Image (tube, grey):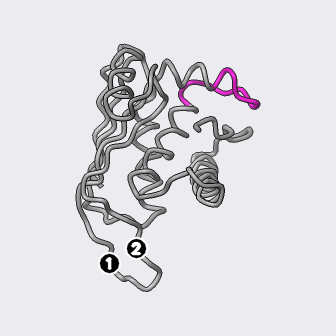
Amino acid sequence: MSIDVNNESGTEVDEQAILDIARYALARMRIHPLSELSVIVVDADAMEQLHVQWMDLPGPTDVMSFPMDELRPPSKDEEEPPQGLLGDIVLCPEVAKKQGEEAPTQHSMDEELQLLTVHGVLHLLGYDHEEPDEKAEMFGLQAAIVDGWRAEKGLTGPSPAPTVS
């Protein structure tokens, strides 16, 4: 799995954890090991520009996903998943920090960025949360991936509750 993390935000983030959880999520979703993903960490001004340009919504947001080859998890009867370029995930640590502090189970900016990375991966794989049933599926899968990764890393305490909308 080729995953690049590029921090352009000016904020120190745990790039290794972002890389690790992205790799874990993609493996769990059975994405081809030769697929490629880019994660870009930007400041609030850059995120706001992207948010306005692509979503026509004001202000910065927490995470945006830009799919390339529209890869999907393989079905249970597919032996070999296709490989390709997954796309880009853009994260904003300033928004992540605020969300982590305001969450019912307060958590760090880095924990929020890990959650947002998984959220972004799922969006790249075609998951969405516009409808209640889609939201239940996506957020359930997101929680299972984050919990699995945290357990594998031996991290204790409750996993961050979903704060993305």
Q: Residue tagged by mark 1?
A: 80
Q: How far from the left and from the top, in percent, is residue 125?
A: 40, 58
Q: Amino acid at mark 2?
A: Pro
Given residues 15 and 165, the one toward you in this image is 165
- Write the residue at 46% across / 63% down: 29
Image check: 49 left or right of 109?
left
* Range of residues picked out in magenta: 100-110
- Write the residue at 25% across / 65% down: 83
C-alpha distance separating marks 1 and 2: 8 Å
Q: How many marks?
A: 2
Q: How far from the left and from the top, in percent, is residue 53?
A: 31, 28
Mark 1 touches mark 2? (CB < 8 Å): yes
Could you say whether the residue bearing mark 2 is in a helix, strand or loop? loop
Q: Residue tagged by mark 2?
A: 74
Question: Considering the image in quadrants, where does the C terminus appear?
Answer: top right
Q: Amino acid at mark 1?
A: Glu
Q: Earlier in the sequence, mark 1 or mark 2?
A: 2
Circle 2 packing at 10 Å, graded few (<14), some (14-19), many (20+), is some
Given residues 104 and 52, the one toward you in this image is 52
Image check: 91 left or right of 99?
left
- Write the residue at 63% across / 51% down: 143
In the rendered image, the vertical position of residue 27 relative to residue 3, given as above or below: below
Image check: 111 left or right of 8?
right
Q: Nearer the viewer, mark 1 or mark 2?
A: 2
Q: How far from the left and from the top, in percent, is residue 33?
A: 31, 62
